[in-house]
Structure formats: C-alpha cells, structure tokens
Amino acid sequence: MNYPYTGQPLDALMAAQTSAALVLGATVWARRIRPWPAAALFLTAIALVTILPVEPDFLRGLGTTLGPDHVKHALKLAAAVASVAALVTRQRRLVLVAVLGQAALWPITDYIQDCDWDLAAAHLAFFGLLIGLFRHSETVSPAASTAPYELHGDFWLDDAILGAIATLAATLVCWLVLQWRTNSGDEWANTYQAALFARLHAYGAVPHCSEALRSFYVFQYMGRSFSQYTPGWPYFMAPFLLFHMAWLAGPASFGLLAAGVARLARRGAAGVAKDQSVPPAAHVRAAGWFAAGAIILSSTALINGASRYPHIFVAAMFAWALEALCVVATPPLPVRAQRQWGGVLGACLALMVATRPPDGAVLGFGLFLYFVYALFRRRIGLQAVALTAAVATLIGAVTLVVLRLQLGVWFKTAYSIVDLIYPWAKVSWSLPKPNEFRWGIPLAAGAYCWWPCAPAVGLAGIALLQGRARRLGFVFFVGTIALLSMYTLLELGRGYDFGYGPRYELALIVPMAVGTGVVLAKLWTLAVRRESSAGSALSAGGPIAVALAAAGLGVVRLAPLVYPHTYADVHEHNRLHDAIDHTAPHHAVIMAGPGVILTDPMDLTENLPLDLYPNQDVIIAIDRGPDESRCVQEKYRGWTFYRTIPGDPVRLVRQ
C-alpha cells in the first residue's frame, strides 16, 4: 500500500483535522482560558488552519483570484492570531513559546514547498501546545500534594482488560481486512526467521533450485538462508509459529502496546505540581482508558497491529521501557520490585534495539539520558541497575551470536550485505529538498492515519503534564526529535513508501496517545466532579461531550476511507493464495508465472524453511525459465504441479 494510503486523502485529512480542531476547541472551553478574548483568538486560529486545505478551492469557486502563496499567508496570519491570544493571557512562559514558535514557523512556512497540508497540520499541533501550556490557579492541598502515584494503585486488571480488547480488535482486523495474510516480502521475511527460531535454528539451508524458491527479503548468503531483518521481532513471533498461529503475534504485540500506553497515561495524569491537589483515582483511571482507546481506534495502528510488521512491537517496547524506568526511578522501591522492573527495563531496551537498531537507538537516547539523571540523583537502586544490565546483556549476547551464525562475522547485521544482493538499496543520507520533508515528518498523512492519536491533541496533553510526570515529556521530546531527524535525513523511502501508513514513525503514537489520554481525562473529570465552581451542567459536561463526539465522528468518517483501501491492496497481493485456497491442492508445487502479482515475483514464494519444514502441503516456486523449472520438477518428483494463469481471480491449471 502506497502513500497517501487512501484513495481520498483530502477527505481523510479533513476528517482528522476537523476532529482534532473540535477536541482542541473543547479543551479551550473546559480550561476557561482568560481573559475571554484570548479564548476567542485561539479558537479563531484553530478554525483558520482547519479550513485551509479546502478554503482555496472554495474561494476560487466564488470567482476569487488567489495568489500562489495564499495558503502560506493564511498560515502566517493564523500563527499571528495565536501569538496575540498568548499575549492577551499575560502568561510569560506562554508568550515566550508563542513568539519563539511563530518566529520559527514563519521562515519554515516560506521554505517548505508543495506541503501545504503538512504545514496546516504543523500549525494546528503548535496551537495545541500553546493551549496545553496555559495555566490557571487550582485548589491548593499541601498535605495531599506529596502523595505518590502508587496511592492510586497499579490497575493491573485495567491493563489486562485493555490488552485483551486491543488484541481482539487487531485479531478482527487481521481476519476481516488482512484476511490472515501478509502483504509484503518484509512481513514474510520476519515470519521465515521466526520459523527458524521456532526450530532453534539461526538460519536455514539454501534450497535446491534456489532462484525459483527465493523470497525477496530472505537472503541466501554463504550457503545460509535468513531474514534481512534483525532478530528482535522474530524472537517474539517464534512461539506463535511453533503453535501454527503466526497471525496472532501482531495482535498480541498490539495488546502489549495498549496496556503500556494506558500505564503511561495514568502516570501522566497523576503528576501534580507542588501547589496543586492530587487528582482523584477516577481521573487517573480515565486517562488510561482514553489513551488505550485512542490506540485501539487508530486505523493505522490497528492495521499494523494486525500485520507482521515489527513497528507496533517497537512502540510497545518503548512504552514499557519508559514505564519500567519510571517505576525504578521512584524510590523507595522494594528489592523485589527493583529486580522485576529492572528486568523489564533491560528486556524492553534490548528487544527494541534488536528489532530495529536505528529506531531503538534514537528512541532509547531519551531513556538513557533520564536513566543517567535518575542514577546521579540516587533514585535508582543497585538491584534495578544490576538486573537491567544483566537482562539487556543476555538478550544482546544472544542476538550477537545469532547474527554471527548468520553472517560469519561479529558485530554486523544483514543490512551490511543488502547492497551486495540489491545494489539499489544502498543507504544514503542528505537534507531533503523543500518539497520532500513530508516523508520524514508525515504530519498530514499521520493526521488521518493515526487519528485519534493526533499531534495537535497529543502535544496539548504533553504540555499539561505536571510535577514528576514531566519526565515523560522529556523522554518523548528527545526521542521524537531524534526519530524524526533520522528519517528526515534518510534517503531510503524518500518519495515513496510501501506499507500500512507512515510506519517508520509509528512509535510516535505512544506520546500522542498518552497526551490524548491526559487531555480527555481532564475533560472527563470536569464533567463527573460537578463541584459548585464547575458552573452549569453544560459547562461541566459540554467539553467532554464535544471531544468524544468529535473523536468518534473522526473514527467513523475515516474507517471507509482507510480499511477498504487496505483490504483491496491485500487482496491484490494475495490473489495466488486465494486461488490456492479455492483449489485446495495437496502435496503440490505451484509454478507462478509473470503477471500474478504487481510487485516483485519473489514476494510470492512464501514458503517456510524447506529443510526444517519438509511436509508443507503447498510449495510456491517462480517460473525462472526452462532450467529452473526442470530443477524444481526433478527435486519434487512425484508432487502435483500447477501453473498459474494471471487475472482476478488467478486460476491454477494442473500440469
């Protein structure tokens, strides 16, 4: 599936942006930004950038002549309106951020070309940050202000329920949208490696007739067959392969992500400054449910969670690593808990790096900085440090041994031989052209792919964090900047993308979901507490009603724009498998000719390692000419052979 990931990108963008704008508007209403002109100006700025993607066509339809820089001028006007709103509040920090932000946005808006949708999404996100930074006096409760987060409990039952719901939701998408299948050579390469691990092998043998049986990202090197991708995600997949349930690995990782995000959102909602009262347990619990709900309802997160791509697993490991770090850095912690959570921290960090080394390194940088800070402040016990190091070292050592067995050398991954196998895939780095930044920073595509995890609402929630919860914001900020910088400078994937949405940046749904959970929990608490200071029922319950209605409406509007597009793409990729299911051959070899698939024919050969799984009912081979076909026929003498006739549906004809 290619960018923009839907056949109607403008409709999808407007669905997401309108919903995000309504949630921000509800936040302005609930937070009672004062004086009232400031609130009016913030709402005006939000409205301006929300309508900008469709406003030029509307004005042209009325006969208005617009200049080529009309959208840029309108964006600058909206930024100026937001800055005036900040000035009216007379809050120094808010004014400083608004002025500095506008000073940065104006030249950026001039420099970036052909990305007006992304610029509009960037401005809306900036306005969300300003709204979150607005502060007003709250009830002071000095005696309660020092109460720790743990007073609210760990909510393990909530985590289990949310994880189960997320797993079930991803399983349904795997069934109804992805049809239990893969949609790329990337997914199959991870499946192949997991099948090797399930049989306790680091690599398989190169099969006879290797060119006819070769899979795109399963490398045949020095007499060994193994995945291009590093072992972290296949480690997790291996038990599911062992029990013939490879499809369940993705949904299970999605359940882990939902539970991890819920814990982080509760931690964020429970944070308080010294002069603030501790939020009630119901407020903390609500943040977890809203954050996990944002993940579960996000179409792209859900589709990736149903797939065999590793990006949801990376996001889950990031979320749980941060949660574990926060736990071990909250003294006093019993020795047993230090060991348990230190082990979780070490495992998550090691698996994150072992799954996608660049992603793990950049996301782990913020975790490392806070770990060093907390260690320096003597907040982390020696038992936690020891278990973190021990578990990370163990997983790292196993990974190094696996890679050594595959490649024959130490401290290299299969990425080091990619250009030997595919010379076009050489990794290069450069600064993008002014019209290429959308590939590394997918604000517009992310807005509709990730909703209800949105940059605008997420930033508002991160800005709302108080007290020790701000450490979440620090780790999120460092990790986000590092991840976006890396993928902005990386040339591979610039100008094209194959996958379910902007998956390279998918780990960013963690801070977005946490921020969304914090925002919605604030609105929810206002509605349920109904204290005398809360005013009328409308002012108390109106904001959360608007926010939830907007979120739900966005999900409903986006569903028919995303899921059918994905379903059609998966169907196109799997026409041969549909034919196999329809014909139901046994002990058969399918000779796939040209035209069966729109991508490379090597995406068809989804065979488990033939030396370790010799009793596969069907083996798929590529028609590489008379010599390779003869080789396959001799190797599988006595099997039934079928040839393919391209079309929709593909037909199998017995030879």
Image (cartoon, rainbow, N blue to C red):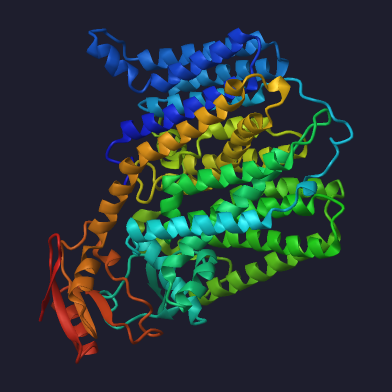
Residue sitting at 52 percent across and 81 percent down? 200
In this orientation, which residue lies closer to the viewer: 286 or 430?
286
Quadrant of residue 73 within the rendered picture:
top left
Q: Does 380 sit left or right of 524 as displayed?
A: right
Above or below, 592 relative to 147: below
Residue sitting at 43 percent across and 72 percent down? 245
Q: Does 67 sit left or right of 256 as displayed?
A: left
In this orientation, which residue lies closer to the viewer: 283 or 401?
283
Instruction: Please indicate, yes or no, whether residue 202 appears anywhere in the rendered image.
Output: no
Q: How many marks?
A: 0
Furthest residue to the bottom?
Answer: 638
Quadrant of residue 446 within the rendered picture:
top left
Furthest residue to the right?
Answer: 143
Above or below, 20 relative to 5: above
Residue sitting at 45 percent across and 30 percent down? 19
Instruction: Please indicate, yes or no, whether residue 185 appears anywhere in the rendered image.
Output: yes
From the top left corner, tell me how far across and down residue 452 is, in percent: 48, 39
Residue sitting at 25 percent across and 62 percent down? 574
From the top left corner, tell me how far across and down residue 168 is, in percent: 47, 59
Q: Does 133 sit left or right of 333 as displayed?
A: left
Q: Quadrant of the C terminus?
A: bottom left
From the top left corner, tell me how far across and down residue 222 is, in percent: 42, 77
From the top left corner, tell me how far across and down residue 411 is, in percent: 58, 66
